[in-house]
Amino acid sequence: MNQQRTLTITSLLSILLFSFHWADEISRGIELGTINASGGLVILFVWLYATLVIAERRLGLVILLLGSILASGVPILHMTGHGLVGGRIQPNSPGALFWVWTNIALGVNGMVSLALVVRALWTASRGTLPRGLKGPDSTVRRDRDPL
């Protein structure tokens, strides 16, 4: 499996887990489901668009970088303060396992996406894009020493 396909899969999985996590928080009353929460919709739209349409361009990779940092940070933000369970989420409440699992899975998947997108950006900055990441704005630079 090439790097582009793996990055697309991990990004889509992060988007899915993030939307499950956000929906669970709205259903529990942790987040308000008002028009003020529409910023989350914009974040999900831009992240999904970058994953499906412009992931082969440098701008798409930068957006995926920001999305993977966001995904990696969700469990860290929830672990500060009361921890994953015991604050607003009661340990034996229905759905607590799903909420904790989405936090952990989102964080781990975000870290994998982060590693993949950093590798893609690093390789692109050296002048050659990895197999599967050759878009219209990617040209191979021949003026550099291969070492």
Image (cartoon, rainbow, N blue to C red):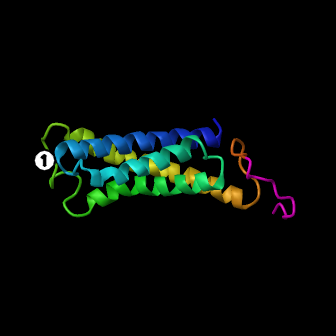
What residue sits 34% from the left and 47% below the top?
104
- What's under tag 1, amino acid-wise? Gln
What residue sits 63% from the left and 42% below the top?
4
Residue toward you, 26 or 84:
26
Instruction: Tell me where residue 73 sits by quadrant.
Output: bottom left
Residue 66 falls left or right of residue 146: left
Residue found at the far right of this picture: 143
Residue toward you, 139 or 102:
139
The secondary element bearing badge 1 is classed as loop
Q: Position of residue 43 (x, y in %)?
A: 42, 51
The local crowd at label 1, few if under 14, some if 14 to 19, many if 20 or more residues have their Cα within 10 Å, is few
Q: Position of residue 114 (x, y in %)?
A: 52, 54
Start and end of the magenta stretch? 136-147
Residue found at the far front of this picture: 35
Residue 113 falls left or right of residue 137: left
Residue wearing tag 1 = 90
Q: Is residue 144 magenta?
A: yes
Residue 53 falls left or right of residue 123: left
Relative to 127, residue 20 above or below: above
Residue toward you, 137 or 96:
137
What residue sits 59% from the left and 53% below the top?
61
Q: Is residue 123 magenta?
A: no
Residue toward you, 123 or 135:
135
Q: Position of residue 15 (x, y in %)?
A: 43, 43
Relative to 91, residue 143 above or below: below
Considering the image in quadrants, where does the N terminus appear? top right
Q: Position of residue 19 (x, y in %)?
A: 35, 42
Mostly what secondary structure, the magenta segment?
A: loop
Considering the image in quadrants, where does the C terminus appear? bottom right
